[in-house]
Image (spheres, helix red, strand yellow):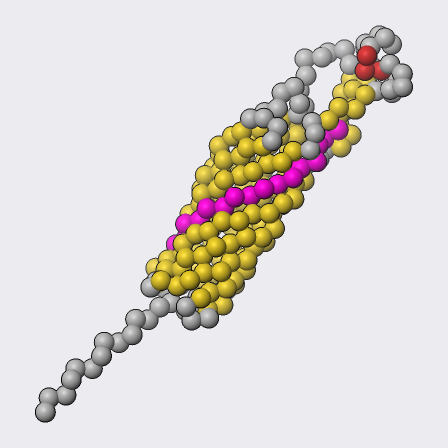
Amino acid sequence: VVAPPPPPPAAVTPNWTGLYGGAQLGYNNLDSNISGGDDAVIGGLFVGYDYDFGDFVLGSSIDYDFTDAEVSTAPNPQVDLENIFRAKLRAGYKLGNGLIYGTGGYAYGKFDNKFRTSNQANSFSQNSEGDDGDGWQAGGGVEYALGRGLTFTGEYLYTSLDVDSPVVRVGQGTAPATNPFVLAPNTTGTDITRGNGKFGTHMFRVGMNYRF
């Protein structure tokens, strides 16, 4: 009697449990409820921890990206998005050496407001910068294990940020006392604002990770 051949060994998938970190680079599209938009390069660093439950993986991470995307809102202050910090959770499903996942969490953006005017008579001073934005982000991606602790990630993220308006005080300067910006009851000047802004970013990023 000839014994049947042994069954083929079960496919071994990577164990995703553990600490990881890496770098990322991609494309960032910024738009707002004010006007204008911009496309820019985005890149940064991240660190996270995953726990492997068999077919499913749960984890958390933080990342920090640099970018330079602007929204031109003339005659209002120009707004530049300079960097983004995120703290997020993710849940994924294992497929061979890959992990398909969804992610979401908290987002913070650092903005730079720039005010320009052709008015040479009045004085202008910025009383409030309004350069911090808080919000949320959500997206998904694929991570693939290359071996020797290295993995490659492709990810899409949408980030929504609410930003308070900067306040610019328009004073008399060299203008006459009849200048409309210093008429009663605003004899010390008139405050102008952009209005609170809601900014959205669409990001497509690739990253290289090392898993410890």
152 falls in the magenta region: yes
Q: Residue furthest left?
A: 1
Picture residue at 53% right of the left edge, 29% below the top: 37
Predominant SS along the magenta part: strand
Picture residue at 39% right of the left edge, 63% below the top: 94
Image quarter in which the N terminus is found = bottom left
Which one is nearer the viewer's eye here, 114 or 185? 185
- Residue 125: x and y in percent read 77, 24
**Depicted 135 relative to depicted 80: above or below:** below
Image side of residue 188 versus residue 49, left or right: right
Count of number-bearing discs: 0
Q: Which residues are magenta?
A: 151-167
Picture residue at 71% right of the left edge, 12% below the top: 119
**Depicted 69 relative to depicted 50: above or below:** above
Which one is nearer the viewer's eye here, 72 or 195? 195
Is residue 212 visible from the viewing direction of this image?
no
**Depicted 148 relative to depicted 133: above or below:** below
- Residue 168: x and y in percent read 75, 25
Picture residue at 60% right of the left edge, 47% below the top: 136
- Residue 118: x and y in percent read 68, 13
156 falls in the magenta region: yes
**Depicted 69 relative to depicted 139: above or below:** above
Image side of residue 100 versus residue 138, left or right: left
Q: Quadrant of residue 15?
A: bottom left
Is residue 199 visible from the viewing direction of this image?
yes
- Residue 87: x and y in percent read 59, 53
